[in-house]
Image: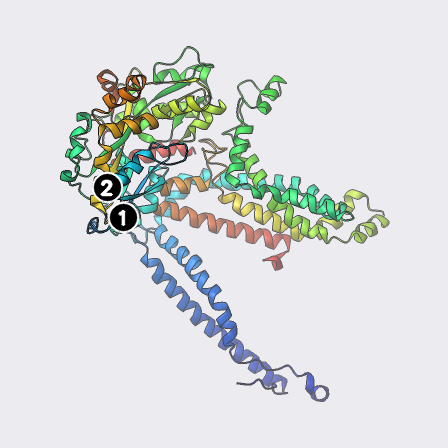
């Protein structure tokens, strides 16, 4: 339609202008409504609500010789060129090409990233992931893992007896430990020459404002509960947990505890904002190597916590057999010893200590990598929590982390 | 009237086409983008904020419902964090304004005759953006740590109590917020001050106003658009910031802001409705505050 001049009469002009406006509004309204409706439809696509358990994907390992492995940073042997020697050998031996990704830097963040796909049974881009006990417990409970075929993992015979039947996975049907570690206490030997023996010692007056604790509930609360004489792997309930929460709350409120952090607690130790802390065993070995030999780690007399990161196969992975082949490879004692020597964490593989002694006798004696019975008898695994308990205890713990 | 119009037939306004398909077509990508990436998440957020826990569900499982009680619960549980967020953001905005105004004035007015100096100074203001915001904040954490030169020398001079510290305190968080948002304040101020007609200042002096009065009655009103834009660009992101106040950066357990509460509820507690309700509250509160502010400062046309 070509444009034509408006009529001369001002009244008619005004009427036309008005009519146009009205028309425009109606149209905008319609368009707006349509846009809103489509947005609503899209929004409804997002998951929500209690879903049925997802079903496992079909295994295509025979035709698809690849594997995606999501793991934590500095958690596998690495040479100066940035290659992973044990992984390279695995690729040569089996012909499976592995895409190793440092994709996990926090159990919660990783879960937040993949949970919607898991609930729908979709491939999350990882055929095996290493996550901590309590998170693995959640995945198994929600049906987000595939059952392992032990026939494909003959080396499972090398799994240390202590870890064969955890309360969240009897018989290790869904998960197998990758590496483990202790949570205990550490201190700056220059500033705290006397050293520490107990969690209680962190609350001494001369460390006021210079103490750090971990934001990982099971480690910080576990150590405090052990100090209170509670067996954290046994039967305990609200009363025991709340007593420990009270201690933590008091020490945060009176300024004894400076900060509550995740992995970044190491920065505080380095900058000496904190002189003593609740910390993870492997980190202190690395820190001493990196920034001068001035920190010492100890498992408190009352006991430390023991945790493991475990392999699991996500429900949507179509390469389950490949993942099992990889797990089997890392349960070979010689391979496990090579990894342990680099990452400084506890290996779950029996026989790795003997293999390590051949590489470096001193390494095989390190209690934080190859703990003996005596060391292990003082380390406790935090018992599995139900969904409701998890929610309740985590809420109490977060309340202290967030202050008021 | 009719006669007058008759004389100017040629200059008649043309009746526009009833409907311009081209304009709609050109707008389409923008509208689609907004629907997909703004409206959809917003509605999803609103729906999530009203969810109720599944009856027999595990941790983190919720069903669609109309559970407005979520809003009451989060306000009851987290009102100190809500107030703290706006308090810190306000303090950081005021500090950033006080620091940025002289800088912007110098670059925009005093350095006008020396374009080279002017552009050099502008580059200096923008330069921090070349380094990641997280890295810069981490660097400050190191600079302000207990055994750093700054803190140890302040203690040696008895300007600071022997057991005093800086990281993990409200001062550190407000300091971090101020530092990180100074460029956002300086640049809009600079753009308005750069156009400031100095003849007005001369006229003010000619009328026997002292420098303070000239500044108050002439410079400030003329630079008001820059002040409003700068304060908005600082206040809005500062209120929602969760990096500076995070325990991993400059904050401590008693400096947590709304962003940190939302993060904890979303990632750790898996309480998605609470996180969503807090986000909606934050958004609504900022909208109201900004609306009132813009109305009061008489610069609605900026929006």
Check disc 2 and report the residue beneath it. Answer: A94
**Residue B135 position within the rendered picture, expressed as x and y whole percent measured from the top left:** 51, 37
Secondary structure type for disc 2: helix
Left of A221 or right of it: where is A167? left
Considering every residue shown, the one lying at the far top of the view is A194
Residue B33 drawn at (x, y percent): 45, 61
Quarter of the rendering occupied by the C terminus of chain A: top left
| Horizontal side, residue B48 vs residue A58: left or right | right
**Residue drawn at point x = 59 percent, y = 24 percent:** B150
User: Residue at image x 32%, y 58%?
Assistant: A45
| Quarter of the rendering containing residue A134 | top left
- Quick check: A15 above or below A90? below
Q: Residue furthest front?
A: A92
Subunit under mark 2: A
Q: How is the image coloured?
A: rainbow
Q: Is there a contact, CB below 8 Å, between mark 2 and mark 1?
A: no
Query: Relative to A399, does residue A203 appear above or below in the rendering?
Result: above
Q: In the rendered image, which quarter is residue B47 located in?
A: bottom left
The 10 Å Cα crowd at callout 1, few under 14, some 14 to 19, many 20 or more, is: many
Q: Please tell me which of labels 2 and 1 falls first in the chain.
A: 2
Q: CA distance from mark 2 to mark 1?
A: 28 Å
Q: Chain of mark 1?
A: A
Q: Which residue is mark 1?
A: A118
Q: Residues within 10 Å of mark 2 (few under 14, many from 20)?
A: few
Q: Of circles 2 and 1, which is in front?
A: 2
Tell me the quarter of the picture where residue A215 sits.
top left
| Same chain for the residues under marks 2 and 1 in the image | yes
């Amino acid at each position: 339609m070509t444009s034509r001049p408006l009529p001369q009469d001002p009244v008619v002009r005004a009427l036309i202008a008005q009519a146009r406006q009205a028309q425009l509004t109606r149209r905008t309204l319609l368009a707006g409504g349509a846009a809103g409706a489509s947005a609503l439809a899209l929004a409804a696509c997002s998951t929500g609500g209690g879903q049925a358990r997802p079903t496992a994907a079909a295994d295509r390992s025979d035709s698809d010789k690849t594997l995606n492995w999501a793991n934590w940073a500095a958690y596998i042997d690495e040479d100066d060129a940035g290659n992973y020697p044990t992984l390279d050998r695995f690729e040569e031996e089996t012909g499976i090409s592995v895409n190793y990704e440092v994709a996990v830097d926090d159990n919660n963040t990783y879960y937040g990233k993949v949970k919607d796909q898991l609930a729908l049974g979709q491939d999350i881009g990882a055929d095996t992931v290493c996550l901590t006990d309590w998170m693995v417990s959640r995945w198994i409970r929600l049906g987000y893992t595939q059952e392992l075929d032990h026939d494909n993992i003959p080396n499972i015979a090398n799994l240390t007896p202590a870890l064969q039947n955890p309360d969240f996975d009897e018989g290790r049907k869904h998960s197998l430990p990758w590496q483990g570690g202790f949570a205990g206490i550490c201190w700056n030997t220059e500033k705290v020459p006397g050293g520490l023996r107990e969690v209680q010692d962190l609350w001494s007056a001369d460390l006021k404002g210079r103490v750090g604790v971990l934001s990982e509930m099971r480690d910080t609360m576990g150590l405090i509960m052990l100090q209170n004489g509670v067996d954290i792997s046994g039967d305990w309930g609200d009363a025991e947990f709340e007593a420990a929460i009270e201690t933590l709350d008091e020490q945060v409120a009176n300024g004894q505890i400076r900060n509550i952090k995740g992995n970044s607690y190491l920065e505080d130790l380095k900058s000496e904002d904190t002189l003593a802390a609740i910390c993870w065993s492997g980190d202190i070995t690395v820190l001493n190597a990196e920034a001068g030999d001035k920190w010492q780690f100890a498992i408190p007399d009352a006991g430390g916590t023991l945790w493991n990161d475990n392999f699991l196969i996500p429900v949507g992975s179509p390469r389950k057999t490949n993942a099992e082949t990889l797990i089997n490879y890392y349960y070979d004692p010689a391979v496990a010893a090579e990894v342990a020597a680099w990452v400084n964490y506890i290996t779950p593989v029996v026989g790795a200590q003997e293999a390590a002694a051949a590489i470096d006798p001193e390494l095989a004696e390190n209690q934080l990598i190859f703990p003996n019975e005596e060391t292990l008898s003082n380390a406790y695994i935090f018992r599995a929590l139900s969904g409701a308990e998890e929610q309740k205890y985590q809420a109490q713990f977060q309340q202290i982390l967030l202050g008021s | 009237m009719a006669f007058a119009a008759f004389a100017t037939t040629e200059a008649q306004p043309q009746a526009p086409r009833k409907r311009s398909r081209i304009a709609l077509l050109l707008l389409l990508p923008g509208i689609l983008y907004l629907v997909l990436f703004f409206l959809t998440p917003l509605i999803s957020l609103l729906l999530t904020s009203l969810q109720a826990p599944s009856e027999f569900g595990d941790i983190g499982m919720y069903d669609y419902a109309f559970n407005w009680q979520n809003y009451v619960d989060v306000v009851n549980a987290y009102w100190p964090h809500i107030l703290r967020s706006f308090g810190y953001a306000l303090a950081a905005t005021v500090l950033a304004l006080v620091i940025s105004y002289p800088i912007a004035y110098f670059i925009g007015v005093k350095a006008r005759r020396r374009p080279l100096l002017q552009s050099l100074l502008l580059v200096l203001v923008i330069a921090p953006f070349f380094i990641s915001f997280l890295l810069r904040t981490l660097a400050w954490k190191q600079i302000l740590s207990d055994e750093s030169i700054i803190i140890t020398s302040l203690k040696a001079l008895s300007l600071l109590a022997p057991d005093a510290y800086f990281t993990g305190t409200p001062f550190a968080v407000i300091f971090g917020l101020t530092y990180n948002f100074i460029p956002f304040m300086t640049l809009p101020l600079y753009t308005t001050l750069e156009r400031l007609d100095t003849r007005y200042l001369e006229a003010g002096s000619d009328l026997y106003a002292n420098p303070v009065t000239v500044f108050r009655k002439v410079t400030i009103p003329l630079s008001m658009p820059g002040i409003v834009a700068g304060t908005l660009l600082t206040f809005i992101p500062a209120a929602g910031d969760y990096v500076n106040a995070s325990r991993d950066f400059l904050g401590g357990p008693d400096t947590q802001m709304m962003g940190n509460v939302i993060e904890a509820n979303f990632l750790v507690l898996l309480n998605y409705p609470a996180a969503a309700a807090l986000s909606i509250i934050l958004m609504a509160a900022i909208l109201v505050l900004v609306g009132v502010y813009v109305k009061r400062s008489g610069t609605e046309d900026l929006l």
